[in-house]
Amino acid sequence: MDGKTKTTLVIDTNYMLISRAFIVRDKIHKDQNIETKLSGINKMFSMILTQVSGFVEKNYPLITDIALVCDQGSWRKKLPIPDSLVQQNITYKGHRTKVHKASGFEPDWELVWSEYKKFVDTLKNEFKLCIFSHWDIEGDDWARYLVEYTENYNKKLKELDNGTPITPHNIILWTTDYDWKQLLRFSLYGTKVVWYNGKMVSVNKEVDYTNKKINIPNLPSYG
């Protein structure tokens, strides 16, 4: 425990993929030829890397670690949806369609996910990025694990307090998934958990709609 503050950026990689897929929807349409689809998929991956690297650079040296979490199947999909919810047309998000024909969004998902796996493997094996991906585990499960791990780490820091200033570690959750906001309640032992969707910041249920640069209360503000 070196006493230096660390802030881990946890990225919902599937959100990044799906949102950028919509931008290149014409290129990755299921009826396109393979060369055009692969070109669109590579452009999508490039956009993801450019935005992440730009965000980290903008918030340097606040962000010290990056963790990319990925859905890979879901144990929740194996759970039956209660009839009472089915009757109300309420579905679990994992069962919802990722095709919107009215907007022309009909990607070749089989090809996209196949190339996506190669992309993630490259980030992990060649670029040595921290990837959390395992069959039947969703991204939000990984996010909760990382938040709880950080909180437990900060708890140990507090228990080992020898009179020197404590510098707890922190988490930034980059996603549009509002379910992740449940993790904002983990704020014990000095842990700061931030939810960020690319436009607004929410810290312990307080939302700042104007400041797009991350500024965690009680941490140094950079830039």
Image (cartoon, helix red, strand yellow):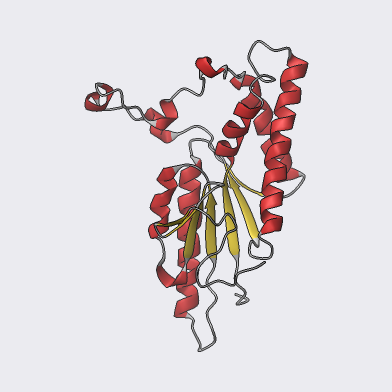
27 sits to left or right of 5: right
Residue ID at (65%, 62%): 64
Please determine whether, in this image, residue 144 is positioned above or below residue 37: below
Residue 160 x %, y % = 49, 81
Of residues 2 and 56, which is closer to you in this image? 56
State which quarter of the image contains the C terminus.
bottom right
Asked whether 163 or 56 is in front, the reply is: 56
On the rendered image, what quadrant is the N terminus found in? Answer: bottom right
Q: Position of residue 221 (x, y in %)?
A: 60, 69
Q: What residue is rendered at 41% in x and 31% in y? A: 93
Q: Quadrant of residue 122?
A: top right
- Estimate the x, y position of residue 158 in percent, counting from the top left: 46, 78
Q: How many marks?
A: 0
Measuring from the top left, give residue 142's x and y in whole percent: 50, 48
Q: Residue furthest bottom?
A: 163
Question: Residue at the left extreme?
Answer: 84
Residue visible at 54% across and 67% down in the picture: 169
Nearer to me, 216 or 10: 216
- As displayed, is residue 181 above or below residue 20? below
